[in-house]
């Protein structure tokens, strides 16, 4: 074998997987199709302090701190949530990816840039990769014991495994605009179905005269750039901004059913390991990568890279990360069935003292379902009923019944 493990994709999931396995003494090849790690940037770069700590990188990658959000509602109102403490950090995503790839190299992984996986064949003895290097048309053959796909939502490894792509996805566009934010420590979230059907828009302050912006939709026929134009035109404080950079992409919001098979594993966006409620994937990618690496190391030590290792990865991932994403998907589906008026009323509840107290204590961008689990507790619901119009009580009751029935009675499953 040329290497013990090939990791395809040098994003956070790939670099963390490569670092952990290389640190255990195995020969690891980290393949990256672009000229530079971290480019082009597809991410809004908003992470929790917990996630920064998990990367092991310095605060040098942090550009700004976020304490809350200003939410633009379907009816054109604004609601401010949070503001009591730092909930998130705005990072230089390119620097983060570079730093994680460097840590993988320091652990012993070999980084190969301008290297794209064209195809692969698995056998009982290993995996043969066909890799295109740079502009060369000839393919290099590389033999490994295990391949890990961390190559995004259109994963070549997933294709080689025959697992397909995520069952649900968001078409989105994001970038930067020349705008001094109205709130230096608050993101803006646009929950307006006419502008972002099935998803939302956002701006993130960088603490300078530049802000990040993005929007998406679950309607695959939508042109996200047209949605962005509509968002900027609809809000006066965005209207005169100049677009500095834009990058489109697909956000998978349903984990793949088969994230591992003999001698092949998927991690990060390639496995659909993304929060269905927000599209954030850095925290879940890093957690998933460490689980993937732990399983891979044990399997390599035992020389058992077949179905047993694949099943263990699936089980450990579901127990540790997957349950949160499974419930997040349920929550997203439930909220998607609300009308704009019902969504407005639900958002207005976040201005109530009782709800604000729960948010202050339980709000966590890494675990959004945890917050809703507390908000859906009977004691909290009974206290906020008085703020809801009587005609919406049945709708709230329906939400609660759906939540408890699906979460309590159904076993976690993918897709």
Image (tube, rainbow, N blue to C red):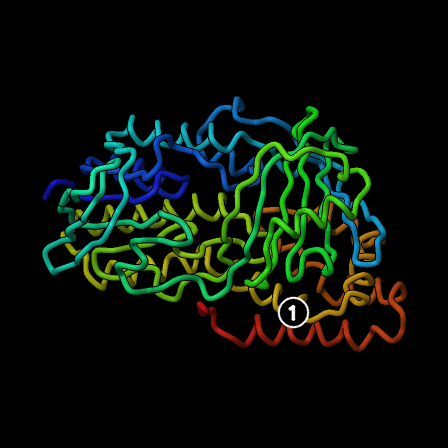
Q: Quadrant of the N terminus?
A: top left
Residue 158 in the image: above or below residue 106: below
Whole-percent x, y for residue 378 in the image = 75, 67
Q: On the image, which quarter does residue 115 sit in?
A: top left
Q: Quadrant of residue 414?
A: bottom left
Q: Residue at x 77, y 33 (%)?
A: 183
Horizontal relation, residue 386 to residue 159: left or right: right
Q: Position of residue 51 (x, y in %)?
A: 51, 38
Indicate left or right for 91 with 380 as reference. left
> Disc 1 designates what residue?
334
The image position of residue 218, as x and y in percent, is 58, 62
Residue 47 appears in the figure = no
Whole-percent x, y for residue 351 in the image: 84, 51
Seen at 77% across and 71% down, the residue is 396
> Foreground residue, 356 or 237?
237
As drawn, 227 above or below 401: above
- The answer to whether any part of residue 35 appears in the image is yes
Say which element carries label 1. helix
Dot 1 alpha-carbon crowd within 10 angstroms: few under 14, some 14 to 19, many 20 or more: some
């Amino acid at each position: 074998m040329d290497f013990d493990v090939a990791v395809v994709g040098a994003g956070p999931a790939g670099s963390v997987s490569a670092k952990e396995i290389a640190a255990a003494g195995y020969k690891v090849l980290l393949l990256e199709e672009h000229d530079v790690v971290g480019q082009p940037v597809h991410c809004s770069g908003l992470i929790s302090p917990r996630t920064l700590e998990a990367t092991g990188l310095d605060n040098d990658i942090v550009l700004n701190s976020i304490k809350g959000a200003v939410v633009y509602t379907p009816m054109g109102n604004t609601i401010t949530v949070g503001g009591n403490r730092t909930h998130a950090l705005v990072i230089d995503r390119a620097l983060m990816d570079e730093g994680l790839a460097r840590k993988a190299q320091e652990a012993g992984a070999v980084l190969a840039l301008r290297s794209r996986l064209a195809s692969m064949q698995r056998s009982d003895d290993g995996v043969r990769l066909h890799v295109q290097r740079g502009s060369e048309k000839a393919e290099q053959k590389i033999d490994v014991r295990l391949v890990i796909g961390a190559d995004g939502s259109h994963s070549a490894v997933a294709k080689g495994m025959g697992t397909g792509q995520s069952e649900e996805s968001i078409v989105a566009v994001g970038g930067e605009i020349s705008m001094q934010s109205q709130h230096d420590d608050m993101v803006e979230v646009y929950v307006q179905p006419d502008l972002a059907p099935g998803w939302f828009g956002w701006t993130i302050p960088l603490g300078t005269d530049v802000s990040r912006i993005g929007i998406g939709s679950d309607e695959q026929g939508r042109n996200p750039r047209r949605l962005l134009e509509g968002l900027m035109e609809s809000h006066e404080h965005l209207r005169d901004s100049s677009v500095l950079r834009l990058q489109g992409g697909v956000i998978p919001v349903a984990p793949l059913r088969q994230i591992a098979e003999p001698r092949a594993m998927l991690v990060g966006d390639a496995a659909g390991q993304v929060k269905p409620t927000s599209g954030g994937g850095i925290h879940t990618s890093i957690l998933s990568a460490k689980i993937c690496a732990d399983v891979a190391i044990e399997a390599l030590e035992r020389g058992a890279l077949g179905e047993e290792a694949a099943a263990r990865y699936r089980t450990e991932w579901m127990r540790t990360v997957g349950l949160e994403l499974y419930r997040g998907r349920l929550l997203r589906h439930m909220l998607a069935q609300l009308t704009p008026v019902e969504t407005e009323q639900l958002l207005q509840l976040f201005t109530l003292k009782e709800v604000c107290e729960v948010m202050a204590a339980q709000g966590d961008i890494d675990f959004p379902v945890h917050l809703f689990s507390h908000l859906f507790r009977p004691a909290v619901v009974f206290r906020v009923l008085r703020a809801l119009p009587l005609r919406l009580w049945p709708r709230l009751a329906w939400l609660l019944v759906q939540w408890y029935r699906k979460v309590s009675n159904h076993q976690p499953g993918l897709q």
